Amino acid sequence: MRELRRTETTAATDPAFLIKALGEASGELRQAFFGLRRAWLLKEVGPPDDGWCLLALAAHLRNTERGVLGQVEAILGSREPELAAVDLDDIPLLDDCRREDEDTLLDEFHYLRRHTTYVLWDISEREWKRGGRHPYRGRVTLLEIARELYQHDLGHLWQARRMVEGLGSAAR
């Protein structure tokens, strides 16, 4: 493993910090799900998380990771590629979630995230500035994508914690 130098002063723009934080997200999500019965994973919650259930949250994170990994690989695979849009606000339908197995979802998210972090770990400081053309946002760099993914994780991990707390001790 090579050591990454801090390129800027804030943690959210430090590649080493971002890689570490991204690498921890799948474990934190698995921990939030630990011991919950399937019925509670499928229970829709009220405000501020209307329309969400915990299984939908896991499916959303897995789906987002697939898309982001595709963006990262496209940027590293060619010069200024056209990137596919990734919907960071998409809520999977409850009926679709019923067909998903929670352990498989968590495993897939973990596998994809591990792949993303390994790819990012291997790039040079200069490569963090490489980018592609997003259909709505224009040019985005790998650093911007990683920072956005980190912020996306934070929001959803807090959401998972809030949802589990809302279910109470009866869910375990």
Image (cartoon, grey):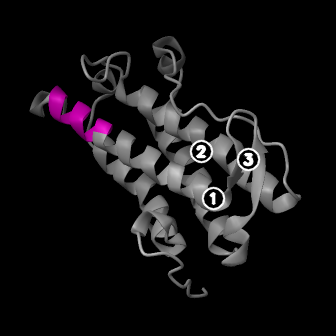
Task: Look at 56% across and 83% down and name the residue there.
Answer: 4
Q: Position of residue 147 (x, y in %)?
A: 52, 56
The answer to which image quadrant residue 137 occupies is top right
Q: Residue furthest top?
A: 95
Which quarter of the figure is the C terminus placed in? top left
Q: Closest to the observer: 172 or 55? A: 55
Q: Secondary structure at mark 2?
A: helix
Number of numbered discs on residues: 3
The answer to whether marks 1 and 2 mark residues whose Cβ atoms lie closer than 8 Å is yes
Q: Amino acid at mark 1?
A: Thr
Question: Which span of residues is magenta-colored?
Answer: 159-167
Q: Amino acid at mark 3?
A: Gly
The answer to which image quadrant residue 138 occupies is top right
**Left or right placement of residue 99 versus residue 38 in this view:** right
Q: Is residue 80 above or below residue 4?
A: above
Q: Which numbered disc covers residue 65?
A: 2
Specify which label sits upstream in the sequence, 2 or 3. 2
Residue at which label 3 appears: 70
**Left or right placement of residue 136 versus residue 117 in this view:** right
**Left or right placement of residue 84 versus residue 81 in this view:** left
Q: Secondary structure at mark 1?
A: helix
Q: Residue furthest left?
A: 169
What main secondary structure does the magenta stretch of the protein show?
helix
Q: Is residue 154 above or below residue 79?
A: above
Specify which label sits upstream in the sequence, 1 or 3. 3
Q: Which numbered disc covers residue 116?
A: 1
